Amino acid sequence: MDKLKSSGEEESSGERGVLHTWRGYSCSVTPDKVLLSRPVLQAALGAKHGVLLVEGGQVYSFGELPWKQNQALSGTTEPILEAGLSEQHVVSVAAGACHSGAVTEDGAVHMWGDNTYGQCGLSGLSVVPNPTPVGVVDCEATPPQPVRILEVACGEQHTLALSTRHEVWSWGSGCQLGLLTTTFPVWKPQKVEHLAGRHVLQVVCGSSHSLALVRCLPPPYEARRPPLDKCGQCNQLLYTMTDKEDHVIISDSHYCPLGVELEEGDSKSGSEGSLCHGKVRSSPSEPILSAQTPKSTCSSGAPVSAPASVSELQDQAPVAEKECVLSAPKGQEESQAAVVDGEVPDAAAESNMDETDGTKASGGLMTTGVKSSPYPDEQALKDYLKRLSDQSLAEHASKNPTTTQCAQPLTEPADVFTSDPATPVAQSVTPMGSALNHLVISCASAVGERVVSTYEALSLRKVISYWGPGEGRERPEERVRQEEHRQGKKSSSLGDIREEEAEGLNRRLSLPGLLSQVSPRLLRRVSRPPVRAVALTPVGVAESDAHLPSLQTEVWSWGRGQEGQLGHGDLLPRLQPLCIKSLSGKEVIRLAAGALHSLALTAQSQVYSWGSNSFGQLGHMESPSTIPRLAKLSEGIRVWDVGAGQNHTVLLADGDCFQPILYYSGQQVKEGSVETSQEQTGGYTQQPVLLPFCMNLGYVSSVCAGGQSCAALADRNVMGFIASLHELAAAERKYYCKLTSIKSILLQPLLKLDSLSSNLGPACTGLLQNLVGRFGRLSQLTGQNSASLTSFLRRSRDVRGLVVLDNAHLFLDTYSEYCAAIGNLLVMGGFQALVKPCQDVFGKGAEAVQKLSECCEDGATLADILINLFYLPVRHLHEYGRLLLKLATCYEVNSMDYQKLQDVCSKYESLALHLKRKRKEAEYTLHFWKSFPGKMTDSLRKPSRRLVCESSNKALTLQNAGRFSVNWFILFNDALVHAQFSTHHVFPLATLWVEPVSEENAGLYGLKVTSPEESFMLLASSPSEKAKWLRAINQTVEQALSGAGLDTSGAVMRADPPISRTASYTFYKDSRLKGATYEGRWVAGKPHGRGVLKWPDGRMYTGTFKNGLEDGYGDYIVPNKTLNKNDYYQGHWKDGKMHGFGTFRYATGEVYEGSFQDNMRHGHGMLRSGKLNSTSPSVFIGQWLHDKKTGYGVFDDITRGEKYMGLWQDDQRQGNGVIVTQFGLYYEGAFSNNKMMGTGVLLSEDDTTFEGDFSDDWTLSGKGTLTMPNGDYIEGSFSGVWGTGLKISGSYYKPNIYDSNKEKSCTLKLGRLAVPSEEKWKAVFEECWSRLGCDSPGQGETSAAWDNIAIALTINRRQHRDSPELLSRSHNKTLESLEFIPQHVGPVTLEKYHIVRRYLIKACDTPLHPLGRLVETLVAVYRMTYVGVGANRRLLHQAVNEIKSYLSRIFQIVRFLFPDLPEEGGLLAEAPNEKKDSDSNGTKIESPKPGRVVSSSALLLPVLLPRLFPSLFTLYALEKEKEDDVYWECVLRLNKQPDLALLAFLGVQQKFWPVTMMVHGEKQQILSSTKDACFASAVETLQQISTTFTPSDKLQVIQLTFEEITQEVLSLLKQDFLWSMDDLFPVFLYVVLRARIRNLGSEVSLIEDFMDPCVQHGEHGIMFTTLKFSGNMK
């Protein structure tokens, strides 16, 4: 923490953490100041000693310390240091009656003092003189884990510890441990399992009882708990049922003994509060209940309860208290009565039997469980009743009935039904209602419909079990009066408890058979009107809970209750923790326990006390109090810390000023008295009294008490810092009390009013509910902050720990939301509507409301008073700002804390001013609605709408308006309204643009207003009015765009809102967009950028817009109502229409992928119709024109097994084309009107050929020639369908045996009637040229083309940015490299040529580049053409030519991009160093090197051919199938021979025969039987020819094969050698045969077709010729 000002530091030495102690409360008492060198952080007082924790973690003890040898006889007034803790840093201390405890910062526990009862947790020692570690270990963990402890609490004979996991551990003796054991002492710390799973906040110890403050469980947790029909501890039924003649008795008579103290047997700790053994009496005036129950020996110590018999239940009625019978040791006298603390309470004989007919009616059943619908059958019910009767009769027949009384713990006193109070019946209470419901339904099945109707009447308790927001949270004063009234008529043994205290609890009921027999009290309760339930206190605030203490708490108690110190309304002990129900919802934040009394401090600064009141220590005159009651304090006294001693209480409170004051309540101690016996003490207080010396102590931060002593920790004012902290905490406590008063006095009674909804109306009712919810949220946050500040004063001085500082946004947001809710209700006239309900509740004057509102205005209406009342919290923001600023002045100006305090202070002040403006806006708007009533204004009236300005004073008019027209402009915070007579139009501000118009023309002061569908001119009456309206509209537009315009930071708004913005708008006028809603980016009144457009009929567009129209990339959905599916388009748009590449998925199942223009398919595209299993699947890929197939295209009719490749027009085949079928038929020729019509050529699979005229598909009609496979042919006229029989009129010819070229000539004619390769896929290339910015091929600017490439790459990358999975890492790198354009200025050298080649490879590798898109499309159309049915051998020639046309046309594009690149066959420029090298070669003449000649095949085939190779090579294999089969047969036959034999057979000269071969690195001789060993490396090299694609790569493999052969021959001959063809050919033929290349003929044909012309006559050409002839050798 930044240091305080230096003067404050000097003054603070010795002035912080000063401890003062005193006894009693007389005016002459002067506190003793405990002198220590360091400030005291915490003090704890025991019976006669005390423990102090000082700064630095050291611990001191003072007083009587009999466990220390040197202090055994007399006490010490000077604190002595506990040396055993000198090496530990202690963070918490505690003191019991005669022992002490400390917790170190690492969570370890140290104990010392008296250990007679095991309270120090160390076995074998009766006294522990010095602090000794106590191990707290969780043995249930595997392995056992040490438990870290937060704090400890010490009683007389026991100790409690709270772990960091907020679980409770205990050790020592007595039932106050909360453990399931009868063996004491408990030396080893054990977990209190009954609190496991709950979040414990604090534990305290009385003399023989314990208290725990527990955070409430969230409601869903309780809802998840299953309904119980049996006790979870002892597994007994929770309810019993008995059928009588005219009614059914249902009893919750189960009693679980785990809730009471068991027999201690041999235990050494004989507590005074234990119950004496003997027969049971509910009070001394009642007879003893005689019944015997076998003693339980189970581990839980839970004896079995004894329900009464059926016959007894018929004659007896239940008594008030719940009790159970436990066995006692034999030999005890039956006449021994139940006594409490050895004496019989005087009030025990009192009774409250005021029933007229001997039967006391219940207020109803708690029926929160789920009703079980299936009824049990009658036999099951009889069996159950028989078992119940048998059990009871057996118990009553038992002899020697010696019992011990132990009463069941009560959550609250219950209602009583009784006709004979002298006859008790064992009963119990369960927290669940579903089991009782189930039992009542079971009963109804057996005893008839009358019981059903009775149960239905009683089940109305479901409706009234939750009265509304105020039930259980009524005003503290009313609750106390009710509790006092009930307590006054209650006996000490609780023999009679009034029904009012039994709300919502389970009861034992007697159900009469008729509804008329139901208690009149019940009927009165049922007749109460239902109330709407509105939660005034939120269940929890998730964000703030992490920073603020919880107010949703419960108090649990256990141990001995002989003085009512457990708070359960009785004097009975509790073995396990039990929740004090009367404190639920009281927001308890701190507990304290004296010897025999208990205290609870609430967030509302009230103190509840209960237990022994023999010396007035409870702060009221009730003696004793078995339930919590409010201490009597003067109005305005707010307690914020409590301490409890043996017979007294000390309170720390706020008074009139913010310096704390002290109150004392309890026993007076005589002055100068050293003894502590009762004889030496004085009187006692009747209510808390002010200690007059408290103002001299300074600023007290905490108090504690113990024995007969009190102690207070105080700080002196350090430069105002301490005073400012106390003032901040006191102001928050006072503020929370004010909010609580508003909630209890005003809101709760109002919300209970039946006529509230009818008075407010639906709209205002919802707004009021929202306001109440916001008020509850604000109230809770304030209460949590108040509790946080209170604990902050006790423990810390670091201002950075303040929640109001560190989490200011919580408070700012809460106040903003709250004030917005007030403003909304105010604008809608809700406060005027609340006047009548307030008068109905509080009277005509409503003085209570006026008093709450602190309104001093004379003549203020009740509505104004209510408004002021609800706006009161806004004042507290100024308090935050003022007090934080006051704290800031305590720091150096340049410190971090000063800056932070200043910043947060300015935020609170800014918000306060902002909310003040918001209030004025709301009041101004309300005045406007009142001034202009009518239907139009009513339709415009909305809760969140605020008026900015309006033109009723004619300050603003419409240009060119009619003379008698009325134009009224109203500017709200969300819209501009233009009203004309009875009509009006609303312009949302988010889509409104306004700009001033020049005043040059005729002095007009104009404003041009633009909305999405209208644009008009407004004329102001003066320049000032123009400026006013311009500023107002711009500011409101800016606020609307920024979101409600909450300017809490004080930032200045910019003058003009952005011209580009994001907003939503619904069109009402535009014919194309009428009713459509657009949400997205806008520019100057037009959709521009990304957005979503939705039409009412279900159409939706998602994508980019430009100037109000769809433009760019977007998705479009169109519902097809007929098919109940959607048409879906995804692609590019232009000027509101589909334009460019896209994919359209039709509802019919068709899919079109290709180019669009003006919402029509136009350009290249592919249409898939149906699926493979549909009725007519087909695929078309080709050119489209105005939504119709026109131009070249390929149509694959999958159903018919035909593929058409040709020209189209208007969706029909028109012009030349080719058809191939799955049966091997081939047709090329003319088509007309979608039919084969005209001249054509038809070939069948067996090479039968017809060339002539056709009139329809496969229909011959006219002249022609039919050629047989053997060469015979017929010329004449033909008619008929091919394959079904032909009519022929002509001549048959048998060719001459010398006419060998006839077949060849016929074959060469194929392709003549097909579409030329250059005419195919023109649309694909045109689109590529278009993307480069050229209207026609080659017509355009190269620089513009490169610009378009860059734009295309950028746009495509941006589209794929939202879907990174579409682009791999390598793809991204490719795109990055394409951003660098190769330099293409000047002659292209070989180096530049390689740069261009590498660029082309990368460009063609991504479809985002225009060239890559072109290649991808060409590959798709090629595969579409020649795969499947298109894999026909007669298409090989066309397929080869098509690839060559691709090369030439792509090369044309490449030369356009690189103009300096030479033409096809041109030479590259030589670099200077290359010229020198060529001169040095002498006169050697050779063909140009392949790398120096530019060719499209060398440049582009490496890119294109690998993608087309599978389909192309399939055609080669089909064409060469017969030749390859013959060749392969020859290969297989010759490869059967050994190497030497094959070499000899092929005529290889013997000098070329290898002699040795290498096997695993060793040379071995080649034998005559050796096989596949000669020229093995050359064979392996040649085999790689099948793994390459391009001719150049295949030729490279051939060259490497020759080199391998040469290398091996050279190593054999060991001399230079020059091959001759006669020598080389046999050797190469051997290698070819051994290579076993399956489709060698196809490989050769592919190389021959695509070989670069420049290498045909070079070295590669010769080698290829050798391979070709090798393959032809059969």
Image (cartoon, rainbow, N blue to C red):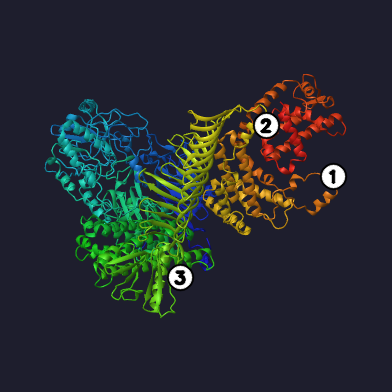
Identify the residue under disc 1.
1484
Above or below for 977 versus 1456:
below
Q: What residue type is labelled 2?
A: Gly
Q: Distance between the residues labelled 1 and 3?
A: 84 Å
Quick one: label 3, few (<14), some, or many (20+) residues within 10 Å?
Answer: few
Give the residue at the far top of this rendering: 1569
The one of 210 and 1050 positioned closer to us in this rendering: 1050
Q: Position of residue 15 (x, y in %)?
A: 48, 63
Q: Nearer the viewer, mark 1 or mark 3?
A: 1
Secondary structure, mark 2, is helix
Q: How far apart are marks 2 and 1 (CA)?
A: 35 Å
Q: Is residue 1606 left or right of residue 551?
A: right
Q: Where is residue 1655 in the image (x, y as percent from the top left)?
A: 74, 42
Give the numbered dot on residue 1449.
Answer: none
Q: Check if mark 2's residue and mark 3's residue have beta carbons within 8 Å.
A: no
Identify the residue under disc 3.
1055
Identify the residue under disc 2.
1641
Q: In this view, does 1262 lie to the left or right of 335?
A: right
Secondary structure, mark 1, is loop
Give the residue at the far bottom of this rendering: 1002
